[in-house]
Image (cartoon, helix red, strand yellow):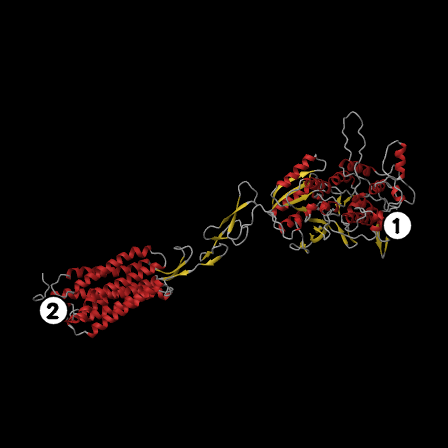
Amino acid sequence: MHTVKHNYNTMPEPLRCTGSIDSYEVQFSCAMIFAIEEINNSTELLPGIKLGYHIYDSCGSVPVAVHVAFQLSNGLDPLFYTGDNCSKSGMVMAVVGESGSSSSISISCIIGLFNIPQVSHLSTCACLSNKQQYPNFFRTVPSDQFQAEALAKLVKHFGWTWIGAVRSDSDYGNNGMVSFLDAARKEEICVEYSESFHRTNPRSRIQRVADVVRRSTAMVVVAFAAFEDVILLLEELLLEPSPPRQWIGSESWVTDTDLLKFSFCAGAIGFGIQKSVIPGLRDFLLDLSPSKVDASPVLTEFWEDAFNCRLAKIHISLCVSGAATDERLCDGTEDIKTLQSPYTDTSQLRVTNMVYKAVYAIAHAIHKVVCQQTNSTTQCDTFSRIESKEVLTQLKKVNFSRNGYDVSFDANGDPVARYELVNWQKSESGSIEIVTVGHYDESLPVGQKFRINRNLTWVDGGTQVPASVCSNSCPQGTRKVLQKGKPICCYDCIPCPEGEISNATDSSDCFPCPKEFWPNAERDSCLPKPVEFLSYNEVLGIILAAFSVGGACLAIITAAVFYRHRTSPIVRANNSELSFLLLFSLTLCFLCSLTFIGAPSEWSCKLRHTAFGITFVLCMSCVLGKTIVVLMAFRATLPGSNVMKWFGPLQQRMTVLSFTFIQVLICTFWIVLSPPFPMKNLTIYKKRIILECALGSAVGFWAVLGYIGLLAVFCFVLAVLARKLPDNFNEAKLITFSMLIFCAVWITFIPAYLSSPGKFTVAVEIFAILASSFGLILCIFAPKCFIILFKPEKNTKKHLMNKIPS
């Protein structure tokens, strides 16, 4: 449009349009005329009533649109017709248009004051859904709110989280981008930049936007802009090609065939208005006779612009005025059927169908006002004066289908949002074509609204979806840590802490495994912790079991040697009954260590501690008995002493049984009140479970162990007292040495037991049992067996009765 500078001294010039005529808008105008003529010839819709129309060229300018709105509001004719053949003329019942959202906003604000309904075919700004501000506004094209949400879902579908955004600096672009950015934020999509521009801006502004696109790291660019703005940006980018970019387009430009010449945009995708078919429209568009062209200034301008010639009457007027012209005259050979123009292209009819449906929506609303259905016929009142407010009321209730396309409006004056997903694909000939590859239908359930049914091609003709992320996806086993000062899509991938996992990509946090589980090496799943206990299958268990069995066999062999030589002086001199009982208890001591090997169970936990406590007390009781016998025997050799009658075989047996019975009582109380039980120890090691026997009652355990220690100390004290008795073979010396070993083993056992981790606690306990048992059998019985087997000459009563030299 021609811009006028006002100096406030002279009357402003009238607004004038400049530039070439838009072939698309000419087609929209003709589609409106075609629909009105169809309705006027219909016997079902408004029978007997003829609709009139008046078409204005707003020049894509808000000031011109405002001027037109005032003209429509004031009425078209200066007088009223009172004849019988026509109702009062000049009152506008409804307005079809505008294409641009800004112009529609301006028009609606004016004609809305007069309750004149407005039905737009291409104004998509979500702001127009506000019924408080625009109560008279309807549209057959979906609101940008739906398109913005669909574009955000499209971007998320292909895994793009780092994008750039450009928009028209207009109501369409600004409101559409706001809706898109809000939807993108909900989908966790980050925007590297968001730039606005307008075709009226200086070129430096468009250059700056182009430079931002070139320098950006985002591979994907979402352009929510009008066709007239996009073409300027693409032309600027064509001068200095930028790195490959994947373009995502709004419906305003992504289906426009005039932009297909920009080959670097091949692979662009976006949502467009659905293609449609309008029977008879192509023939109507091509039926342009010279009389029709001459009768319409718009068609005249279109004809001259299309064929680059001047019609005769214009040429004559120019000559008369003296203006020079080099353009040729139209000679009548021009054929509209051979013209390759958006006007003649009816292959898609996207927006054109929106115009067609808008006209029919208004006609149906008028039909509801003036016509009534009686029986099978429709009667219309052709003489009553109707108000535009009535048409506005009925327009809200419109619901019909035309050529298979439904027309209705929701409470906001919006239709059901349906889009085609289109993709710019290179054909075999090398040209770029717009191919429908999917659909979006807002009326379908969640999860079914968006579907792709054909393969897509991407930037540079690739078949793989290009990546556009600020940071690569964090694999399982890691978590996202946001980079300081950057959007949420820019992050570092940090391995999960010890004991925690993440089993999803791009996890924002790690979570710990259950108590009995531990992460695998990748930290993406929890595996059961290995259960550890002292087993017969491992080397340590085999060695300890071998020593246990070997010790038991040694005790049995010793008992066999003693039994074989039971009548020999050395066996008889050392209380053979207690010796055999001691060897039996030592055999049990060796064997009880086997109960500590293997997986703990309820019975094994109870058995291992009670068997250990009782057998060792039995052993200590026997040793104590032998020590007392040595002392009593020495006392018996003194003149007048009869002490042996007070500690004979019966007393010896009672002493052993009494001491052992006390331990049996302690173990019984322990088992009854708080017995040992199998337990999974999760605290010692993080990565494995120690299967062990819990003591149940620590008091019971230490009472058992303390009682054994008490007997051992008592036995040690008595043995020390008897060690220097003047016999050649004094057993007290051997007992003293064995008790030294026993006490040393069990004293060192306590700190080792408390500090040993896991299964080594059990191994320490077994080692203490075996070491003390071997100490007893080797110190007490090994010297005797050596004499019996290898020094039989010392196995005589005479040798044993000899005094040891002082």
Task: Name the quadrant of the N terminus.
Answer: top right
As drawn, the residue found furthest toward the front would be 429
As drawn, the residue found furthest toward the top would be 9
* Cα gap from disc 2 to disc 1, whole angstroms: 153 Å
Front residue of this view, candidates 510 and 162: 162
In the rendered image, residue 786, in percent from the top left (x then y), is placed at 19, 68
Q: Amino acid at mark 1?
A: Gly
**Marks 2 and 1 in Cβ contact (< 8 Å):** no
In the rendered image, residue 84, in percent from the top left (x then y), is placed at 92, 44
Task: Name the quadrant of the C terminus.
Answer: bottom left
Q: Residues within 10 Å of mark 1 (few under 14, many from 20)?
A: some
Name the residue beneath numbered marker 1: 48
Front residue of this view, candidates 422 and 265: 265
Foreground mark, 2 or 1, reads 2
Residue 88 in view: no
What's the mark number on residue 799? 2
Q: Quadrant of residue 762?
A: bottom left
In the rendered image, residue 605, in percent from the top left (x then y), is placed at 35, 64
Compared across the picture, whether 294 is left or right of 418 comes to right
Q: Quadrant of residue 242?
A: top right
- Against 767, residue 243 (above or below) is above
Q: Amino acid at mark 2?
A: His
Front residue of this view, candidates 643 and 586: 586
- Against 401, residue 600 (above or below) is below
Q: Residue at x 77, y 46 (%)?
A: 393
Q: Quadrant of residue 447?
A: bottom right
What's the mark number on residue 300? none
Under circle 2, the secondary element is helix
- Against 669, residue 561 (above or below) is below
| Number of residue marks | 2
Under circle 1, the secondary element is loop
